[in-house]
């Protein structure tokens, strides 16, 4: 009874963490149009530096995070990650006061640093705290926490910082006086001070809560079978892990395209900012539906690798839908990619770290580095969309991603893996 109670408590605490970094991560969908307005940016390529700064932090901090976790343990590492995220949130205050895009990007990078540490700790934690066969189910539960928060965050922040956005755009276009224009932009920029100040305080409080919580430390030490399998090896001796890193890179890139780029995509086909500011939440609600299905079906009715394969096939089909449709129909296809994406992370992560033994933490760090796909693919889109239609640019970026994910689901995850 006590063991079961501790297990439920651990799941609940990690669920809170997934809610928090879902809320913070998916604010980017609102920050992209907001900062384009407030910082008077000229192109979508500049505005999409928001995702670049945020997700590149994972690339640079993932491996250092694994070494930090070896020193601190999982629980203290999670608390430290929350504190770093708070520092990034507080940096938004001087950034807003100075209307400095560079400071905003720095704050986002610091938040990404904290999330890199938090995710390097929490993802393997939730994977190995129970049977590996049901890891996708547990991560799906975490995904619901993450994506419900993500669906709420653009609605909440959008209501605060992008209220009357179309009217503001009209005013800016009509205002020729430099002083009046500056005052209007400064008023807009200042709207983020209160929400990000509150966010910083909440993150500090959560860091203290995690530090004082009874969350048990877990060991990723090898079993006797794994010791024999990993003896004398390095992390590079696990080809399925390396294939998994690329899979995460492409999956996260496709997920960010569906979640954060859907707004600029809608704007580029003539939909007003008052409408596009909500598009990210549509993608995330469709992901929530996918997670619920995952909880019900994995592993009772379907293996996690089969769920991944079906999700990849659906992703390819919806990508084709984006290519061949226009207007709101193409927006619906992009939003439904959230449903296709939902079970990908929950399946890829445990498939890629299974059997790593003593290499679990560094393997997790490699996978977290793959989140940099969320930085790279939107930038590619921002440049190629200059020379082709938005739907064509979107298709040629995301369709190959889903094709590779299908390969990993059907074959890649088993290459070099010890057979039990």
Image: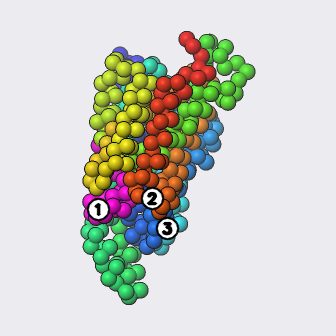
What secondary structure is the magenta-colored segment mainly? Answer: helix
What SS does tag 2 mark?
Answer: loop
Q: CA distance from mark 3 to mark 2?
A: 28 Å
Tag of residue 341: none
Residue 242 located left or right of residue 254: right
**Comes first in the chain, label 2 or label 1:** 1
Q: Looking at the image, tell me whether mark 3 or mark 2 is earlier in sequence order.
A: 3
Residue 53 point in image, percent of width and height: 53, 56
Q: Residue beneath label 1, please?
A: 271
- The residue wearing badge 2 is 388
Disc marking residue 101: 3
Secondary structure category for the residue under label 1: loop
Question: 164 or 391: which is nearer to us?
Answer: 391
Residue at position x 67%, y 30% in the image: 236
Residue 64 found in image quarter: top right
The magenta region covers 261-285
The verdict on residue 341 being magenta is no
Whether residue 366 is visible here, answered yes or no, is: yes
Percent position of residue 222, x then y: 61, 19
Which of labels 1 and 3 is toward the front? 1
């Amino acid at each position: 009874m006590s063991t079961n109670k501790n297990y439920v408590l651990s799941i609940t605490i990690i669920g809170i963490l997934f809610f928090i970094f879902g809320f913070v991560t998916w604010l980017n969908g609102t920050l992209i149009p907001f900062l384009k307005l407030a910082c008077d940016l000229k192109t979508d390529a500049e505005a999409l530096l928001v995702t670049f700064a945020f997700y590149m932090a994972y690339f640079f901090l993932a491996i250092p995070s694994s070494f930090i976790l070896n020193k601190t343990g999982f629980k203290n590492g999670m608390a430290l990650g929350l504190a770093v995220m708070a520092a990034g949130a507080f940096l938004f205050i001087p950034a807003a006061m100075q209307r400095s895009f560079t400071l905003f990007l720095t704050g986002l990078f610091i938040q990404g640093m904290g999330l890199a540490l938090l995710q390097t700790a929490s993802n393997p934690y939730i994977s190995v705290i129970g049977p590996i066969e049901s890891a996708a189910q547990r991560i799906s539960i975490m995904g619901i926490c993450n994506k419900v928060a993500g669906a709420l965050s653009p609605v909440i922040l959008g209501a605060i910082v992008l209220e009357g956005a179309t009217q503001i755009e009209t005013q800016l276009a009509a205002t020729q006086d430099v002083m009046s224009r500056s005052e209007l932009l400064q008023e807009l920029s200042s709207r983020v001070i209160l929400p990000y100040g509150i966010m910083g305080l909440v993150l500090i409080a959560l860091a203290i809560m995690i530090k004082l919580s009874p969350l048990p430390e877990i060991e990723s030490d090898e079993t006797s079978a794994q010791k024999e399998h990993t003896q004398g090896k390095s992390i590079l001796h696990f080809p399925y892990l390396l294939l998994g890193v690329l899979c995460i890179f492409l999956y996260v890139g496709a997920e960010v395209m569906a979640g954060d780029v859907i707004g600029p995509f809608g704007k580029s086909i003539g939909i007003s900012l008052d409408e596009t500011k909500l598009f990210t939440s549509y993608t995330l609600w469709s992901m929530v539906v996918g997670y619920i299905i995952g909880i019900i079906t994995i592993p009772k009715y379907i293996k996690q690798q089969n769920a991944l394969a079906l999700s990849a096939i659906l992703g390819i089909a919806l990508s084709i839908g984006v290519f061949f449709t226009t207007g709101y129909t193409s927006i619906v296809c992009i939003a439904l990619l959230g449903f296709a994406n939902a079970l990908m992370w929950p399946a890829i992560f445990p498939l890629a770290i299974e059997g790593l033994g003593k290499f679990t933490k560094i393997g997790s760090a490699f996978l977290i580095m793959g989140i940099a796909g969320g930085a790279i693919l939107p930038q590619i889109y921002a440049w190629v969309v200059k020379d082709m239609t938005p739907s064509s640019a979107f298709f040629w970026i995301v369709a190959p991603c889903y094709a590779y994910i299908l390969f990993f689901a059907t074959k890649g995850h088993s290459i070099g893996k010890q057979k039990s």
